[in-house]
Structures are given as structure tokens and as C-alpha cells.
Amino acid sequence: MLVRTPADFGAVIRDRRKQLKLDQATFAKRIGVSRQWIILVEQGHPRAELGLVLRALDALAPSPLGPGLVELATTLGADVPFMAIDSPMALAWGRGERLHPLHALDSRPVLLTIPDFSVPTPDAYAWLAADRGSYAPLARVLAPESLATWESLIMVAENDFEPVVARRHPVIAELVDELDAAGAIVAMMSGSGSTVFGVFSALPVADRRPSRDGVRMVETRTSERVVRVELDG
């Protein structure tokens, strides 16, 4: 079967599960996800976490794809190839299908501030195109050492979507400012939004963190490694 869409991928998952004579709950347990997640994937819902299942299924396959896994991941979405590799940090270009793994930076604490609204990616691209008008790419050299430490990475970190989305949703810019004020070494919107993250040397105390109605906060850390999928049974 030629896999071109998330629905095609869901059919592959379902067929492989049935070949293994596994129900959804057992299959989910073996690859380390929830049964509800398997249901959504088999129904063809597009999810960035497809990378996790791709790596798990690759381990299950009689003939693992190895590096070819990224080629399959590319058909499922721009974020999926990165989620399918064993590196927690990479330089990506194209639509995200071309990846150069990098040495991971030291783990730092992160605050995620998550507004109670989403930003559809097609909308963000449309706003970006409308706001900048005619576009001519600018030449730029990204020196390897600029990606070697947090201090150097901060100097080149930017998100073209951030000002565009913030003009439609001012809370985005307000959260960036509040994370900066709380001591973040870098704070910006993630992807096309609406989550805004702050990377810290040490997490701020509670009364210095952003606090507002309609915004959920999650503590996490940047990753130094990718945990390989291990199958039970």
C-alpha cells in the first residue's frame, strides 16, 4: 500500500495490528501509547506524535526501514520526520524533511504557557503572507558555533510567525514579555502557536511566573536524548 496521507497510515497501523492478532488495548501497551491514541491514529487523525509510533512499528517490522523511516514520515506531516529520528536536536530545512542531527544542548527547565485557543497552521501561513506582501528570501550564514551553546543559540533564535500571530492574539506577546521578566534566557512562541515557552537556567518562583485566566502552565525540561522504544512481550 502506498502511504500518502494520515488516513493511509492509519490503515497500515490497523492492518499490521490485525496481522499480529492484537486488539487495540494490547497493541497500545506494547508500543507505549494509550488505546485512545491508537483509535485516533487508525481513524487517520494527523498527529506529530506519529513519529513515536513510526519508530515503534519500525522495531516491530520483520524488515525495519532504518533511515528510510524519515522518508515515510515526510508523507505524514512537516513535524513527523524530526519525531522519527533518534536525536533530540536537529537543523531542519525544506518542509522539515531534511534534517541534520546536532549535539544536544544541556538540559534546561522550561515553562510552557498554553492559552485556551489554538492557531490553525493554515491561518498562520495566510497571515504571514498577507502581512509581509511580496517576499524575497534573504541570504544568511548560520555558523556551526551559533548552535553549540544556549548563549549562542539565543542570539539567532527567532520565529517569523510570532509577530504575525501576536497581532491577532495580543496575549502571545504579553506571555513572551512575562516570561522574559521572570528570567527566561529565551522566550518565544512555539511554531505557529498558541503555546509560548520560556527556557530558564532555574525555574522562577511562583509569584514571578505568568498568571492569568485562560492560560495553562506546564513545567518540563529540554531533552538531552531520545529514549528508544522498547517493546514488551
Image (cartoon, helix red, strand yellow):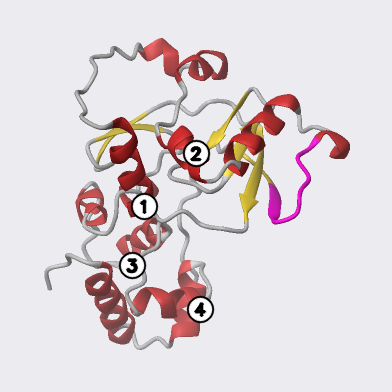
Q: How far, Cα to Cα, is label 3 from label 4?
A: 20 Å
User: Where in the figure is residue 165, as x and y percent of width and height?
Assistant: 47, 42
Span colored in magenta:
209-218
Question: Does residue 216 show up magenta in the picture?
Answer: yes
Q: As drawn, which residue projects farthest toward the left?
A: 2
Crowd band around label 1 with a 10 angstrom C-alpha radius: few (<14), some (14–19), many (20+): few
| Marks 1, 4: nearer the viewer | 1
Relative depth, front residue between 113 and 11: 113
Rendered position, 79 above or below 155: below
Which residue in the structure is indicated by mark 2?
167
State the SS at label 2. helix
Q: How far, Cα to Cα, is label 3 from label 2?
A: 46 Å
Which residue in the structure is indicated by mark 1?
123
State the SS at label 1. helix
Rendered position, 97 above or below 202: below
Which residue in the structure is indicated by mark 4?
36
Q: Residue at x 12, y 68 (%)?
A: 2
